[in-house]
Every structure is written in structure tokens, then in C-alpha cells.
Image (cartoon, rainbow, N blue to C red):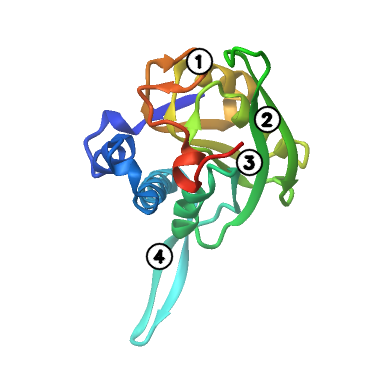
Amino acid sequence: MEIINLSEQNSVLNRYMSEVRDRHYQNNRQLFRNNIRRIGQVMAFEISKRLDYAPQEVTTPLGTLDISLPTDTLLLATVLRAGLPFHEGFLDVFDHADCAFVSAYRMYTNREHTEVGVHAEYMAAPSIEGRTVIIADPMLATGGSMAAAYEALAKTGKAKAVHIAAVIATPEGLDVVKQALPDEQATIWCAAIDPGMNEHKYIVPGFGDAGDLCYGGKL
């Protein structure tokens, strides 16, 4: 399984990442959501380079020409609720794609809030059979939500290829996802890989809770 860390290259992505991490910028939810969306757009462009292409004739007002266009049947999947702005960024680029939504959320399983389980209870998705699937979730912390989302989708068929997309990942989360997905068909894309998590399973330095920063706190 290939892991691509886009922070290893200098690009405008660094600007967006610096702003989503900055606690002062985080006071503006609209700016935070917009930057998550723009990170999705950049990552979608990078993933587009890995798709299969074939020439297609296009007719202009003055003639015709061949243009190489993607032949993959795309399915964009995301984990509710934090993944929505990230998903919108991908959909801005892959506007012909079908979409899937999985409700997979983490629950603390002890009183000290140091142990986390993942519960998936809802999915709306077409079959992934023969499709190129992109699963977008901003935070790949423990890896449990991403693995649960993939396992739910995998019950509907066998994908042609799978791309896992995260804004920030941890080495522990990457290991969990690598175990959950077939090596021969999966690629993991990250805008950054941070060193690890704190005792409450939040990424450090990270940027906090993506869902809360996008939409407000929850009970």
C-alpha cells in the first residue's frame, strides 16, 4: 500500500494547512470549512493523475480534437459529519462522481476518555463493484472510523481501486487502515502526518475536532 504525504512537497496546500491549524483562524468557522474544502480540491487534483484515461473526440465550434478523459467510474464516500466540507472539495473536482455517506463515530469506552471505540450505524451508497472509490475523512487518528467506513462499503461489492484521503493522519491510524484494506488496490493520501495522539485520542499537534470546528460543539 502506497502512502503519499503531500506535505513533503511545497505547494499552496501549506497555506491552507497553516490556517486550519491556527487557533486564531479557527474562530471563523466559514474560513475553516473553506480551507478544508480547498484541501479536498487540491488532493482530488493529485488523485486525478492516478486515474485511467482514454482519448475522446470533442467537437468545438471550429472543428474536432481528441482529449484524454478519465474512464474510471468514481464513487466519493465520506464519514459524517466532519467529512462534509472535505467531501465537497472532492466533488468540486469530480463533479460527475456518485456519492456515498457513512455515519461512523467514535465513542469513549472508559470513564477517563482514553479508550475509543467506533460505531457505524447508517450508510447511503450505491454498490462499489468495479468503481474507483475515494473515502474522504479529515482526521485519520485511531483509524477506526476510516476502517469502519471501508468495511461497510466493501459489503456492497469489490472496488477497482480505493483511495483513502485524510487532511491529517497519525502513524497508528495509518497502520490500522493498512490492515483493513487490501494492499494491492489501496493508496492513502495525506496533507500531513503528525507524530501521534494525546491521552484522549486527539491528533497532536493536529488542529482539534474537525466536526466541532466546522459546525459547532456536540453533546
Q: Which residue is mark 4?
A: 67
Q: Amino acid at mark 4?
A: Ile
Q: Which is more N-terminal, label 1 or label 4?
A: 4
The span from disc 2 to disc 1 (Cα, nearest Å) is: 15 Å
Outermost residue, left direction? 10
Q: Residue at x 70, y 45 (%)?
A: 128
Q: Which is more N-terminal, label 2 or label 4?
A: 4
Q: Residue at x 40, y 68 (%)?
A: 66
Q: Quadrant of the C terminus?
A: top right
The span from disc 3 to disc 2 (Cα, nearest Å) is: 19 Å
The span from disc 3 to disc 4 (Cα, nearest Å) is: 23 Å
Q: Residues within 10 Å of mark 4 (few under 14, many from 20)?
A: few
Image spot of residue 8 (x, y percent): 28, 28
Q: Amino acid at mark 1?
A: Glu
Q: Which residue is mark 2?
A: 148
Q: Amino acid at mark 2?
A: Ala
**For residue 42, which numbered disc appears in the image?**
none
Q: Which is more N-terminal, label 2 or label 3?
A: 2
Is label 3 in contact with label 1 (beta carbons under 8 Å)? no
